Amino acid sequence: MALNNWTKDQHGWCPLLPAAALLSLVGAAIGMGLGEPSTLSASPSSAMKDRDGDGLPNGLERALNLDGTLADSDGDGFPDAEELARASDPLSKESSPFAGLPISAEVTGYSARGITHLVIAIYLEGGLGAGHSFDLGAVYEGRPFILKPEHYLPFAEVSVARTMDLQDVVQVIDIAVPERTVVDLGNLTIFTLTAPVEEVAVTQASAMNLVSSGGSPFQVVKAKGGKTPVSGNGVGTAIYRPLVSGPDRPASMIAGQMCVQTTQFSGTQGLSSRVEVVSASCETADSSCSSSCVSSVGSTFTMLDPVILVGG
Ligand SMILES: [Ca+2]
Ligand SMILES: [Ca+2]
């Protein structure tokens, strides 16, 4: 499909993921309208553990090195959940949300006690995001799937977080998936899209690219100061951010380090880019490094640059 013509209503979504536990999450329909707040009023199965009441579960705060006792970790006035939803860095005072988008969503995640949590933070200007839609999807082996809300909300806890401007709202959706499923899939992208309901063009997108290494799930992120793993001349710098942290960290992971890789673009696979790991080593960081980091050299994985989802 022509990527620059990609739209949220594009046909050709594949109906099934080849993993039983994710089957129930997958659908082929377009998503919910956020102008209808009842759509998101799922009843949480239990109270989300959120020590500072900022809408973000403790496990996510730990995995992202946020301050779990402060709603605004960097003290810039924007609560952590809002910075996540609006693609700014909750650990940098120099980074603050870009004004202008009435709705934006970002996906991140963490793993604890055998459960991987896909955490979606949705910023809604004026509290409703009226006239806009939100979609959640996955890409597996280059093939995109839209996940229907009725299939993921039963596994989700939904909370509302405050924002700097009290008229606005951030909705946090925490979806529980067996960690085993994510590890067994080995390589999976979760993405979000937001768009005006009246138009087919996607205005904003985010993606979380997951890989498994040494039996644990990791998110591929751009190294600080490095190039996006799929951009430029094809050479990038990726780090593997572990989804597990603290007491959940398996003994095979090395604390105080992080897997840093040089990658080389090696072609496309459907919507995704395939990149080859050219070099990899555990480097000092406030994180942990997979014992399989160095042996990833020569392997490839796919990842989605959310930029290609925008437009249409
Ligand atoms: Ca919290
Ligand atoms: Ca902040």
Image (tube, grey):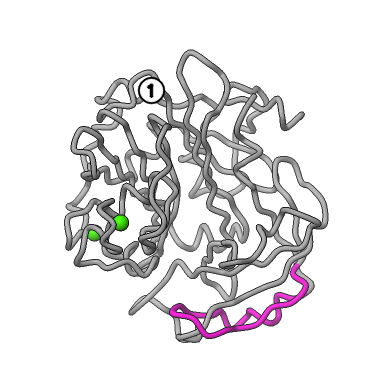
Question: Which residue is depicted at the point 76% across and 46% down?
Answer: 269
Query: Is 275 displayed left or right of 309 in the figure?
Result: right
Mark 1 residue CB less than 8 A from any atom of ligand 1:
no
Q: Report the quarter where the N terminus lies.
A: top right
Ligand 2 - quadrant of the structure image: bottom left
| 108 to 17, vertically: above or below | below
| 205 to 110, vertically: above or below | above
Q: Of helix, strand and loop, which mostly describes the magenta segment?
A: strand
Amino acid at the residue labelled 1: Gly
Return the residue at label 1.
33
Q: Name, please, the residue furthest toward the front.
A: 94
Query: Is 171 displayed left or right of 251 in the figure?
Result: left
Task: Find the magenta span and give its range.
Answer: 277-297
Give the quadrant of residue 185.
Answer: bottom right
| 214 to 243, vertically: above or below | below
Question: Which residue is depicted at the point 20% across and 59% down?
Answer: 50
Q: Where is residue 93 in the image (x, y as percent from the top left)?
A: 35, 60
Give the quadrant of residue 12.
Answer: top right
Q: Along the line of sight, which residue is nearer the eye, 166 or 256? A: 166
Q: Along the line of sight, which residue is nearer the eye, 76 or 271? A: 76
Q: Where is residue 145 in the image (x, y as percent from the top left)?
A: 58, 36
Task: Indicate whether residue 195 is drawn in magenta.
Answer: no
| 1 to 209, vertically: above or below | above
Under tag 1, what secondary structure? Answer: strand
Label 1: how many Cα within 10 Å (few below 14, some 14–19, many 20+): many
Q: Report the quarter where the C terminus lies.
A: top right
Q: Where is residue 71 in the image (x, y as percent from the top left)?
A: 22, 58
Question: Which residue is depicted at the point 43% across and 42% down?
Answer: 98
Q: Along the line of sight, which residue is nearer the eye, 95 or 222? A: 95
Q: Position of residue 118 (x, y in %)?
A: 42, 52
Question: Which residue is depicted at the point 26% across and 64% down?
Answer: 58
